[in-house]
Structures are given as C-alpha cells and as structure tokens.
C-alpha cells in the first residue's frame, strides 16, 4: 500500500525529509502531495486527540472495567 | 526529492489578523440558553440539516433555525426551541435537571460496553465442500483434517471464553463448513455447559452452516442442546447457485431443504439466513427479497461485500462500486417499505440496527457500528489453529497474509496478553471515532462505528481518511437515506420506530 519511502534527514531548525517513490509509476509531484496530505492528516489527528483523549480513555476504561485487567 | 516542512507536528497556528477572536462570535453572555454538546450536517439539497446531541437524538432543522440556534439567537417562542430543549440540545433557567437526564442517557447508552466480549466465534474447521469465489476464508479440500480445530485448542479457547465478564455468552461455530467437524462442536457445547454450571452465564450457541451436509444426527443434537442455526441464502436458485458453486450445483436446493428440515425440528424462528451481495445480485434485489418472503423469513440483511479474503483475491470486491451498492440497498429498502404497506411484516436488519441507535436509548452489538470498535470488546475469534483474532474480518485478512489483528494464540498467551496487547489496544484507541478527524465533528458519529479492520484493509491504517473511506460514504448515505424517508412520510417513521424497537 505504501508508495513512498520517507527518510528524515534533519529535525533542526527545520524538518528535512527525503522522499523516494517505491514504484516507477509514482511521480515526484504526486509523492509530494501525498506526503503533505499525510502530514496534515496526522497533525489534525494529534490536535483532536489532545482535546478528546480524556473522554476516549474514560470510555475505553469503562469497556475494560469488569475484566479484572485494570490497574496492573 | 528533498522536502522541507515547518514543524509538521506542531499544532496549526490560527491567529491571522483578518479573523476576529473567538470571543467575538460568542454571544452566550446575552443568550437565554446554554448549548449542550451537539453537531450538525447537511441532510439534502433543500437547506435542511440534521442536528444530533451527545446520545444521538436528532432533529431536522432548516438552515435559518440552525444558524440562529448556533449563534444563540433562537427565541424561546420559536417552535424549534422546545424541541431542542426536550432533546437536550440546550438548557435554560427553567431546566436544571436536563444535564442530569442527559448524563443518565449517556450512561444507559454506554453501559453495555462494560459487559465486554459477548460473542465468541470458534472456527472449528476450514474445510468446506463449496467453492464460493467470494468466500472470505481460505477453503480447503474437505477431507484434510489438518484444517480442523483440535480438542486441546477448543478447551484452551473455552478458558478464554469464560474469562469474559459478559453475563451473556454466545458461542458461534463457523468454518469452512462447521458441520464437517460436528464431533468438536459436540465437545465444545458439552464442556461449555459443564463449566457454566458454576459460571452461571446466559449461554447460547449458534451453528453457521450452508446446510448442505446437515444430517439427522446434527439436527437432533441442535434440538437437544437448543442450538440456533444460521445459514446462507443469496436469493433465488440461479443466483444462489452461481454465487455458491459445489459439486452437483445444488447449493440452493440443499439450503432450502435444510431450512425446512431445520425449522421442522428446531422451530421456525430458530433458523436464520444471511445473504451476500455480489455483482450478480445488483439487478435482482426484489427477487432476492421475494425469495426470503417465499421462504417465510421475517426479514433480510442487505449486506455489502467485504474487502477481505477471496473477495479481493478474485476481484469480487472491486466488481461493483459503493454507489452501485447504495442503489441496490435503497431499491431493496423501498421495496421492503412498500411490502409493509401491503401488510407484510418484513424487516431490513441493517436499517433496523441503525434505527435502534437513532431512535432508542440503546446500542446494537453489531461490531461494524461500534465505537470503541467492537473488535475484542464485542466479539472475538478462535481460529482452528489456536490463533485469536480481533474479529471475523481480522481472520479473513490473516488468510490473505496480513496478521495485523492476530491477538495471540490460545496455547501461548494468557487472557491478559491477548486483551492488553498492542494488537488490540492500539487500533481500539487510535480508531475511537470521537477522537479522529472527520468523525469527531460528524453529526452521525453517535450512530456510526470505527471499523479499524476495514480501514486497515482498504487504506493501510486503522483510522483512515474518512473522505476516502467507502465505509464512511456508505454510512453517511444510509443515515441520510433513513432520515429523509422518515421525514417524508409518517407511516415510514412509524414503521422505522417499530423496527428500532425490534432490532
Ligand atoms: S465514518 Fe463517516 S459517517 Fe461515520 S462518524 Fe466518521 S465521518 Fe461520520
């Protein structure tokens, strides 16, 4: 499923990534677009998770509450 | 190619000068009411919107009303005001119990989660005498015992079954063709009942079978042990036989004969049937429903094809688009509605499960429509070789070489290892709909599910991008389709309320 390989070359002062297409059919522009879309998506995931993880953990905690597996 | 990104994992900064501060949009200081958590989305092209509250109660409002409500400008004299108040979208000075009531509804809705795994699927054999091209698990020649679950694996699996705190435990036997390993089914039933003398759960058994090899011994056993039978029926003979090849090309004949014989012994309502939609089904939805009616079933589950196993290998999954399935589905649903108008008491089970979430304070145990996802929590699978999978779909994926949702093995791993392992907790946590882009702001989220296995299978990660998700497209269309039909016709609303309370 992965079509692009990403290597992080530097993290300071900017994050520098090297993208390599894994198949010949993937064009540089497509790889760039795909990667940027992925980064935006994950950025959004992290922002939402930060706001909602308390609620999520409470509900997951409820699901496991009678299993005897909590608190270990 | 080298690409430079400015801190990709920092939160976006939105303080652009041309936008006013958030407070400028907050008129709550002067408002007569406080909004409780709610979300909205467009219903159709007629400027109508669906608004849902925290527990999935909904209202359909026009654009102007929803705008006023959101800006906290809705006057108490507006007819929508009382409706919003009654359904816990707002509180005002008159209502100090509304928050407690809403909290109670939330608790009621979530309480069944704590029951943990109620459905335990035992894959007693992979052997099957059918060779259906869309079959989602590998088939094996039916005389090769290497694909049978062993006694030891069955007993170890039962150890895990009884670790589940659920007051109701359902053990379902699947295959391949489960009845090809009847001796093991007998052993499991006997042993589970013995253990239940002390465990004291509400214990139920289901045999999933194509009925082709159903004999009197199996029937007598099911009768004696109160076991339900679930079979496959894809529609009229020609379609069913094309979908389900077997030696003799008589799958339909055997299924129908088996249904009659099983009903005769076990009772009419102890025999259920499920259909699978293939590309050959798409132009025949009425004929499929008629076949279910002819055989006196009380309903049908119009299922889409899953993106797993042989369905992908044989390109059956790609054979029709999600849009084509939705056309098929709604043609079928409208036909069923028209049948009910004519006096037939006939239900569409997928709609009924969704309606239960929409119109009652209760949840369904349908794994696909759960968040947190139903994997492990609602259902778990013990494969013939002792591998434990998070769901039936997970083992189908594994048959294609993807072991992502293999949770462990009954011979090697404890209940703790299996239930607290990353293979289960990671997808459960990551895919929680209230915490992912798209779903967290979606008005349909209280009715929808997370389905990490589907998103992993189709997009390579358990969350997926919802705008690209066939699951999301299908769910949104389904929710909108059901609401539109209820809004257009009070008789349909009454029918849907009846289904919701029966599901
Ligand atoms: S999957 Fe789609 S329809 Fe379901 S909650 Fe998420 S965004 Fe809404």
Image (spheres, coloured by chain):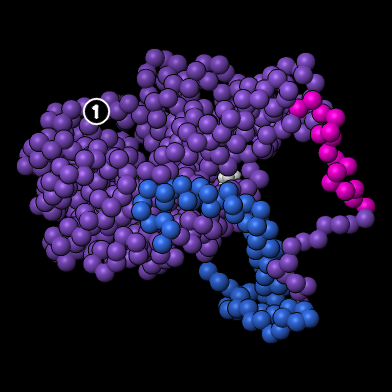
Chain colours: A blue, B purple
| Disc 1 residue: CB within 8 Å of ligand 1 | no
Q: Is residue A49 left or right of residue B35?
A: left
Quickly name the residue at label 1.
Answer: B269
Q: Is residue B333 left or right of residue B380?
A: right
Please report the residue visible at 53 percent of the width from the left and 63 percent of the height from the top.
Answer: B461
Which chain letter goes with mark 1? B
Q: Which residues are magenta?
A: B18-33
Relative to the observer, which residue lies in front, B315 or B296? Answer: B296
Quadrant location of residue B274?
Answer: top left
Query: Where's the C terminus of chain A, which quadrant?
Result: bottom left
The answer to whether residue B191 is above or below residue B167 is below
SS label for mark 1: helix
Q: Residues within 10 Å of mark 1 (few under 14, many from 20)?
A: few
Magenta stretch holds residue B260:
no
- Is residue B456 in sight in this rendering? no
Residue at the far front in the pictured view: A71
Magenta stretch holds residue B29:
yes
Relative to the observer, which residue lies in front, A60 or B441? Answer: A60
Please report the residue visible at 66 percent of the width from the left and 25 percent of the height from the top.
Answer: B96
- Is residue B168 in sight in this rendering? yes
Please report the residue visible at 29 percent of the width from the left and 67 percent of the height from the top.
Answer: B413
Q: Position of residue B377 (x, y in %)?
A: 39, 50
The answer to whether residue B372 is above or below residue B34 is below
Q: Position of residue B365 (x, y in %)?
A: 40, 40
Q: Position of residue B230 (x, y in %)?
A: 25, 40
Quadrant location of residue B303?
Answer: top left
Relative to the observer, which residue lies in front, B86 or B270? Answer: B86
Residue at the far right in the pictured view: B18
């Amino acid at each position: 499923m992965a079509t692009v390989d990403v290597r992080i070359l530097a993290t300071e002062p900017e994050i520098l990534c090297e993208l390599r297409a894994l198949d010949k059919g993937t064009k540089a522009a497509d790889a760039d677009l795909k990667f940027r879309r992925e980064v935006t998506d994950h950025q959004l995931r992290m922002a939402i998770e930060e706001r909602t993880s308390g609620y999520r953990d409470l509900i997951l905690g409820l699901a496991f509450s009678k299993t005897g597996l909590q608190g270990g | 190619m080298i690409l430079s990104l400015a801190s990709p994992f920092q939160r976006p900064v939105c303080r652009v000068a041309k936008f006013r501060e958030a407070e400028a949009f907050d008129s709550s200081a002067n408002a007569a009411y406080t909004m409780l958590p709610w979300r909205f989305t467009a219903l159709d092209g007629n400027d109508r919107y669906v608004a849902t509250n925290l527990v999935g109660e909904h209202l359909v409002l026009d654009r102007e009303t929803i705008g006023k409500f959101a800006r906290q400008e809705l006057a108490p004299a507006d007819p929508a005001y009382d409706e919003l108040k009654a359904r816990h979208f707002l509180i005002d000075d008159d209502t100090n119990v509304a928050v407690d009531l809403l909290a109670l509804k939330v608790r009621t809705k979530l309480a069944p989660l704590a029951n943990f795994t109620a459905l335990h699927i035992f894959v007693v054999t992979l052997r099957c005498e059918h060779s259906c091209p869309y079959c989602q698990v590998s088939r094996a020649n039916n005389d090769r015992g290497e694909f049978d679950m062993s006694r030891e694996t069955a007993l170890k699996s039962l150890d895990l079954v009884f670790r589940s705190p659920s007051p109701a435990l359902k053990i379902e036997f699947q295959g391949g063709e489960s009845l090809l390993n009847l001796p093991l089914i007998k052993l499991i039933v006997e042993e589970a009942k013995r253990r239940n003398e002390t465990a004291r759960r509400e214990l139920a058994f289901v045999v999933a079978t194509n009925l082709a090899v159903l004999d009197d011994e199996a029937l007598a056993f099911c009768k004696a042990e109160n076991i339900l039978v679930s079979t496959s029926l894809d529609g009229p003979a020609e379609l069913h036989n094309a979908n389900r090849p077997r030696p003799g090309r008589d799958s339909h004949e055997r299924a129908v004969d088996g249904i009659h014989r099983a009903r005769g012994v076990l009772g009419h309502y102890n025999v259920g049937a499920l259909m699978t939609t293939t590309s050959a089904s798409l132009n025949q939805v009425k004929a499929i429903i008629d076949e279910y009616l002819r055989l006196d079933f009380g309903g049908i589950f119009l299922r889409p094809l899953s993106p797993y196993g042989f369905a992908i290998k044989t390109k059956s999954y790609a054979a029709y688009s999600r849009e084509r399935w939705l056309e098929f589905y709604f043609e079928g649903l409208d036909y069923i509605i028209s049948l009910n108008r004519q006096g037939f008491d006939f239900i569409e089970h997928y709609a009924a499960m969704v309606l239960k979430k929409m119109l009652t304070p209760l949840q369904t145990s349908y794994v696909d429509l759960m968040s947190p996802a139903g994997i492990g929590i609602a259902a778990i699978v013990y494969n013939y070789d002792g591998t434990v999978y998070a769901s039936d779909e997970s083992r189908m994926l594994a048959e294609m070489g993807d072991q992502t949702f293999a949770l462990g093995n009954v011979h090697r791993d404890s209940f703790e290892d299996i239930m607290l392992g990353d293979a289960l907790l990671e997808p459960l946590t990551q895919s929680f709909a209230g915490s992912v882009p798209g779903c967290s702001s979606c008005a349909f989220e209280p009715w929808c599910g997370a389905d990490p296995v589907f998103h992993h299978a189709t997009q390579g990660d358990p969350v997926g991008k919802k705008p690209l998700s066939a699951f999301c497209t299908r769910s949104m269309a389904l929710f909108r389709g059901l609401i539109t039909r209820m809004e257009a016709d009070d008789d349909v609303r009454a029918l849907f309320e009846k289904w919701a309370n029966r599901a």
